[in-house]
Image (cartoon, coloured by chain):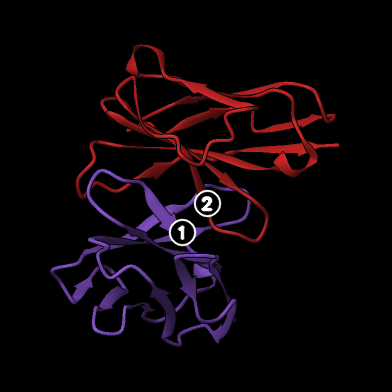
Amino acid sequence: GESVGLHLPTLSVQEGDNSIINCAYSNSASDYFIWYKQESGKGPQFIIDIRSNMDKRQGQRVTVLLNKTVKHLSLQIAATQPGDSAVYFCAERWQAGTALIFGKGTTLSVSS
Amino acid sequence: EAGVAQSPRYKIIEKRQSVAFWCNPISGHATLYWYQQILGQGPKLLIQFQNNGVVDDSQLPKDRFSAERLKGVDSTLKIQPAKLEDSAVYLCASSQGLVYFEQFFGPGTRLTVL
């Protein structure tokens, strides 16, 4: 099975709303996490990352929260825009030097 | 800064034929990855190179898939012979190194096996 999973396959929001995309991971030893955005026909695009020694990291309009107690990762997008419509993947790395393990993704649809 | 380049962007072949994909990583990136992404799923690692050496190929179906990274820069991924279940997008990614470096992805090659 998947080592990283997302709680909802789809999420629909209105433009201007805040979006929260959730992800559960299974390996408590994972040391690094990344959120990617993938638009149709394109490769995944880096959004934000967080190390396991942190519990929150903020970027421009995005915030990632890491709860190691329950092995949960979330991506918050403020003031969601139509251009944010895409599939969002969380990915974990089990240890330094290894590749990322991706979940199945959440499709975010933003309506005007 | 130029991104990760891949070619071709699309390929249609019949089962049992051979196919090859090419990747040119971001200049200076030592680590290169090939992922397979089946429709509706997240990318799955096939092989990881550090310079021209293989770091992880545990999920590469070695009876039909092969990859090389000569001179530690460009890389090719080959499938011979292809099966119907190989239909997917093949993504190449690169990163500066192995520790806390984000992976930059190319646009992918969409393979359809008929």
**Residue denoted by label 1:** A102
Q: Residue at x 24, y 46 (%)?
A: B101
Residue lying furthest top? B71
Whole-percent x, y for residue B102 in the image: 29, 48
Quadrant where the N terminus of chain A is found in the figure:
bottom right
Amino acid type at image mark 1: Phe
Query: Eyeballing the image, is A63 above or below B10?
Result: below
Task: Give the colour chain A carries in the figure.
Answer: purple
- The answer to whether any part of residue B86 appears in the image is yes
Q: Nearer the viewer, residue A80 or A105?
A: A105
Whole-percent x, y for residue B89 in the image: 63, 43
Task: Give the colour chain B carries in the figure.
Answer: red
At label 1, counting other C-alpha atoms closer than 10 Å, the crowd grade (few under 14, some 14-19, many 20 or more) is many
Q: Which mark is residue B72?
A: none
Query: Eyeballing the image, is B8 above or below A56?
Result: above
Question: Is B70 positioned to the left or the right of A57 in the image?
Answer: right
Tell me the element at label 2. loop
Contact flag, marks 1 and 2 (Cβ < 8 Å): yes
Quadrant where the C terminus of chain A is found in the figure:
bottom right
At label 2, counting other C-alpha atoms closer than 10 Å, the crowd grade (few under 14, some 14-19, many 20 or more) is many
Tell me the element at label 1. strand
- The quarter of the picture where residue A79 lies is bottom left
Query: Eyeballing the image, is A101 above or below A107?
Result: above
Q: Nearer the viewer, residue B93 or B83?
A: B83
Q: Chain of mark 2?
A: B
